[in-house]
Image (cartoon, rainbow, N blue to C red):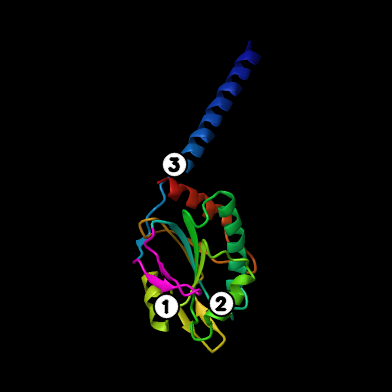
Amino acid sequence: MRANHRLLTVIISLVILLGFFFAFSLWRESKEIPVLDKADPFVMNTISGEQYHSDNKKVKLLTFFYTRCPDICPMTLYDFKDLQLQLQNEGLFGTKVELLAITLDPENDSNEVISDYASAFNANSDGWKFMRGTPEETKEITDTFKMKYEKVSDDVISHNTSMYLIDQENRIRGLFNMANTKEPVDKEEIMDTVRKLIKE
């Protein structure tokens, strides 16, 4: 009798525990993505000479880079290459989601230099836009995102290592770290957030 009572207690405890984890997982799935800030829409030329308008009702992951960057930028863009493939496989690339890369060094990064650089990552311009503006245009856009950078020498630019996830209404909905030698870009978290934004 006591053994049956003990077994019943264990079963009830397990059911309660499973219910807790199920409720917790539902809460995580339904948790709203915060609006961190409003990003002003911008217009900038792509390296192919087309005008890109950011107010195009698509979800965008934006990173800033420069081609002479020795580590963080190329490592991040290799992760972008993986994201490009995932987005293509899910039918989102270019149609609902875009990857954006804006150079911080327009003086050295000509369209031809960036084009060669982009080819190393198999960047598909249908949904991965490499862009280059004037120094003034670049500064205006970085200020919109509160992104700080400084040219230390002709070859070195010190810059923030944040990437920006922007929703269809030009609101910043996520900040993600660029890659470094110890940790790649958190592609799984980015993709999860992107999928949620598309469903909003």
Q: Which amino acid does label 2 sit on?
A: Ile
Which residues, given as a range, are shown in magenta? 40-56
Residue 136 location, x and y as percent?
38, 82
Image quarter of residue 122 = bottom right
How far apart are the alpha carbons under marks 2 and 3?
40 Å
> Pointers 1 and 3 in contact (CB under 8 A)?
no
Which type of secondary structure does the marked residue at label 1 adopt? Answer: helix
Left or right of 94, for residue 79: right
Earlier in the chain: of badge 1 and badge 3, it is: 3
Residue shown at 59% from the left, 67% from the top: 77
Q: Nearer the viewer, mark 2 or mark 3?
A: 2
Residue 49 location, x and y as percent?
47, 75
Disc number for residue 30: 3
Q: Which of marks 1 and 2 is in front?
A: 2
Disc number for residue 23: none
Viewer can see residue 165: yes
Magenta span contains residue 107: no
